[in-house]
Image (cartoon, rainbow, N blue to C red):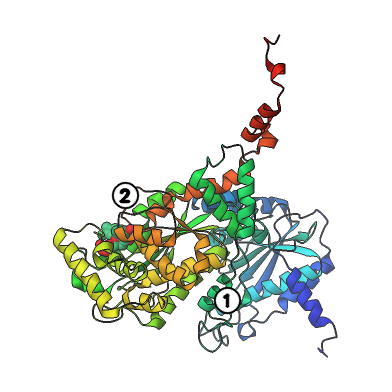
Amino acid sequence: MSALQPGDRDALHRVLRARRDVRTGFVDTPVGEERLHRVLAAAHAAPSVGFSQPWDFLVLRSPGLRDELATLAQQQRREFAASLPAARARQFAGLRVEAIREAPLGVVVTCDPTRGGRHVLGRHTQPRMAAHSVAGAVQNLWLAARAEDLGVGWVSFFDERVLARTLHERVGMPLHLEVVAYLCVGHVEGFADEPELATAGWARRRPLAWAVHTDTWGNHAMDPLDETLAALADLDTAEGEAAAREHLTRMTVPPGGLGEVGELGVRLSGLAGSCPPPLPEPAVVAIFAGDHGVHARGVTPWPQEVTAQMVANFLAGGAAVNAFAATVGAEVQVVDVGVAADLDPAAGLLPRKVRHGTRDMTAGPAMTRDEARAAMRAGVETARDLVTAGSRLLVTGDMGIANTTASAALVAAFTGASAEQVTGRGTGIDDATHARKTDVVGEALALHRPDPADPLGVLAAVGGLEHAGVAGFLLGAAALRTPVLLDGVVSGAAALVAAALAPTASHAWIAGHRSVEPAHTLALEHLGLAPALDLALRVGEGTGALLAVPVVTAAARALADVATFDAAGVTEKDRAEKDLATEDPTESRGDAP
Ligand SMILES: O=C(O)c1ccc[n+]([C@@H]2O[C@H](COP(=O)([O-])O)[C@@H](O)[C@H]2O)c1
Ligand SMILES: Cc1cc2nc[nH]c2cc1C
């Protein structure tokens, strides 16, 4: 009866792959009644909680009402645009989000939470199942529409209550209904091969393997950290670098005139594998936050609670990092990998806590190897999430009272420098505290004798959860060939760990600035990275790296925009010299006999 035919499976998968969310290219051709009926019948055949079929379909043809709804959507669009960081807002300005006027039909799909009475099987435990069932009906509609060559665009730029009230007033939609979807439906010029948002660079598709966990959470076909390290084994940058070096010689600047900015352009091109490289925007700063057991040793005058309090400040938009991010149009994200306090959920906070702060490194390892790996994985996954969400420049940040102590110990372990050489004044400490902090670093090094050939061991022994998070972030970004700007000493120390695990990853790293912490200078020297700025900052959070965002953007833009000598008709120095050498001296001399 309902047996499938040969070829059905392939046909179904073709339809699934060819389905698009369409917002452009609707045409006037009317949608035939029979065609529309088949599409709505497919929606009506969807599974539903307790077989309650909580949906209704309101088909809107009236251009007047659609015009009114389009105005509501435009208002929401303006509000969303105003909430975006500048670089994102520029990108958003070019995107279509609805085609309410252009599509000949609007189909409003509603959910009646009272459908089926009090005893709907399955809904008594999960009231949201009613709306979820309606979403299933929308998907059926979408696929059936694709099979009928009809485009569908699901518009969510509505305040649900305003939309429901407007539909109540205009067409009598009962007030107890929820609007699950407003769909623009109609014939279209064509269907794109890829989602419009992917083509526009707004977001990228995540590989399926990242989303599949087997038996235990996080058990993917390949561990994200191992997969990242494997991908980095053959990160080749030679081709893009060579193309950029060649292009630099043809640009209308004196040879070598762009100095370190030219070198940055070479790095970006190497990473991209082509010249010019893509513009590195939008940018996002990820502030990895964690606490430190070594705080108990009196290495800083600040109480440990300040870590959580500053995280709240970042999320409220009141910290230096927020001011600097706004200056360069970057987004701010906070990643809790190890704050001692439990943090409430908040927009912009990624809850990835591995443990509530590290242990005191002078009493034993700060973390287990598994904990260090878990925090690194959180960093890899943060990089993956931000890159697939459309960021093209990642920026490191950190927050953790006492983390300059752990940073100093890490830098000593990888560079061989002494406790005296690496220990700085952190947030600003007096001589007595500095002397104690130096002793503490020396004690930890003596206790663990960290072996730089065992980077994970070093990290677990004397590092912090935010160092591990940043290290994973640096590796994850590099594996996705996405540039990362490094902030201060915490990022420098984390980069030493990451470079020891995967030396090629440093192709993706740009030192944003040099902080006043002595260990930071040592780390940058060891990594062979020249800082873009040197402003005597010692805030952390990502502040120094953010200030370098325009330098990185300019490096990429120069390769794309600066005219070549040929194109601009500017005579090259070598050409001028050559011309001079070959010129007949008698010709140019007006006083020739
Ligand atoms: O970025 C730097 O180089 C830097 C230098 C000094 C201090 N910090 C910040 O200050 C905090 C750690 O300082 P301390 O003295 O408690 O170790 C931590 O939240 C860091 O982000 C950061
Ligand atoms: C106030 C304050 C702000 C910070 N930002 C990063 N680390 C910090 C440490 C303190 C103490």
Ligand 1 within 8 A of label 2's CB?
no
Asked if 564 appears above or below 322 in the picture, the reply is above
Picture coordinates of residue 80, whole percent (x, y): 53, 54
Q: Does the image show residue 313?
A: no
The total number of labels drawn is 2
On the rendered image, what quadrant is the N terminus found in? bottom right
Horizontal side of 485 relative to 535 (left or right) equals right
Picture coordinates of residue 270, whole percent (x, y): 59, 57
- The 10 Å Cα crowd at callout 1, few under 14, some 14 to 19, many 20 or more, is some
Instruction: Say which amino acid is labelled 2.
Output: Ala
Picture coordinates of residue 232, whole percent (x, y): 56, 70
The disc placed on residue 408 is none
| Residue plotted at (62% across, 76% down) | 208
Residue bearing the label numbered 1: 210
Please tell me whether mark 1 or mark 2 is closer to you in this view. Answer: 2
Picture coordinates of residue 514, whole percent (x, y): 37, 53
Q: 138 or 492, which is in the foreground? A: 492
Q: 224 or 578, which is in the foreground? A: 578
Instruction: Say which amino acid is labelled 1.
Output: Trp
Residue at the outermost left position: 432
- The 10 Å Cα crowd at callout 2, few under 14, some 14 to 19, many 20 or more, is few
| Residue plotted at (58% across, 67% down) | 235
Asked if 125 appears above or below 515 in the picture, the reply is below
Residue bearing the label numbered 2: 536
Instruction: Give SS at disc 2.
Output: loop
Q: Give ligand 1's quarter of the image.
A: bottom left
Per the model, the C-alpha gap separating discs 1 and 2 is: 40 Å
- Picture quarter containing residue 360? bottom left
